[in-house]
Image (tube, rainbow, N blue to C red):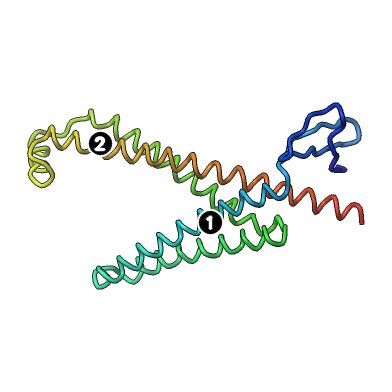
Amino acid sequence: MSESFLTCSDGMAESEDTEYVSLSNGRNSFLRNVPRNGKMITECLKIACNDAIWAAGYAFLFLAIVVGYGEHISTRTKLLFFMVLTCDICVIASLVYGLKNKNHRYMIPSLFYHLLHIVMTLFICFFSAVFIMMLGVKLAKEQKRVVAQFVAHSTEDLEIGLLCGASSVFLSAVYYFRVTFWKLYGLYNCYRYFHRSETSESQQV
């Protein structure tokens, strides 16, 4: 597949934020609108900053939990928290390095990381929706009375609380899915752009 970056002709209107990428396989070719390199890198840097803010919040939460309840948390749980935080930092560092050097290979960890987040978010959405629907399945009257003594004043209050909680989790998961999908889409476009540029340069050499 040969690739070339074309400029817009006089009869074709083109915005300043778009360039046309021509792909041909010898028989057919087509044009795709691809954001310019600078704008694409800027969007990915915004994604990296978003991930860095998330990692900073996660680190603060981890520190607060360890300081406040460290003696009641097992070493294995602390290690799990630390591994997740380390993974976040490594993925962000790899993404920034790949954007700085325009190397698509260093963007692969971030792509897989956000794809994993999307899968987890879909699972949470599904679980929350099933939980909301399963609230119609009633417990035994004695069981509901015992649970309500610890959670709410009445069984009705308990069910309303569970419904509100599950609905909040579902809506939060949907919002997080939307944000993560936007991030994954932007990263994939940038990855594809760098990959094509590198392939084009290697073919010219």
Q: Residue at x 44, y 43 (%)?
A: 176
Query: Quadrant location of the N terminus?
Result: top right
Q: From the viewer's side, name the closer residue of 130 and 153.
A: 153
Query: Quadrant location of the C terminus?
Result: bottom right
Sort mark 1 into few (<14), some (14-19) or many (20+) by Cα contacts within 10 Å: some
Figure quadrant of residue 189: top right
Image coordinates for residue 178, horizontal then vertical, percent: 49, 39
Q: From the viewer's side, name the closer residue of 148 and 180.
A: 180
Q: Residue at x 28, y 68 (%)?
A: 73
Q: Is residue 183 left or right of residue 71?
A: right
**Image height check: is 204 above or below 32?**
below
Q: Residue at x 52, y 64 (%)?
A: 89
Please name the amino acid that badge 2 sits on.
Answer: Cys
Q: Is residue 164 left or right of residue 41?
A: left
Figure quadrant of residue 148: top left
Q: From the viewer's side, name the closer residue of 129 and 186.
A: 186
The label number, if any, that marks residue 200 in the structure image: none
* SS type, badge 1: helix
Q: Residue at x 79, y 37 (%)?
A: 20
**Image height check: is 123 above or below 55?**
above
Please name the amino acid that badge 1 sits on.
Answer: Cys
Number of marks drawn? 2
Which sits earlier in the primary sequence, circle 2 or circle 1? 1
Image coordinates for residue 67, horizontal then vertical, percent: 28, 71
Image coordinates for residue 7, horizontal then vertical, percent: 85, 39
Which residue does the numbered mark 2 point to in the structure image? 164
* SS type, badge 2: helix
Figure quadrant of residue 138: top left
Report how far apart the C-alphas of labels 2 and 1 lie in the structure.
32 Å
The label number, if any, that marks residue 49 in the structure image: 1
Badge nearest the viewer, 2 or 1:
1
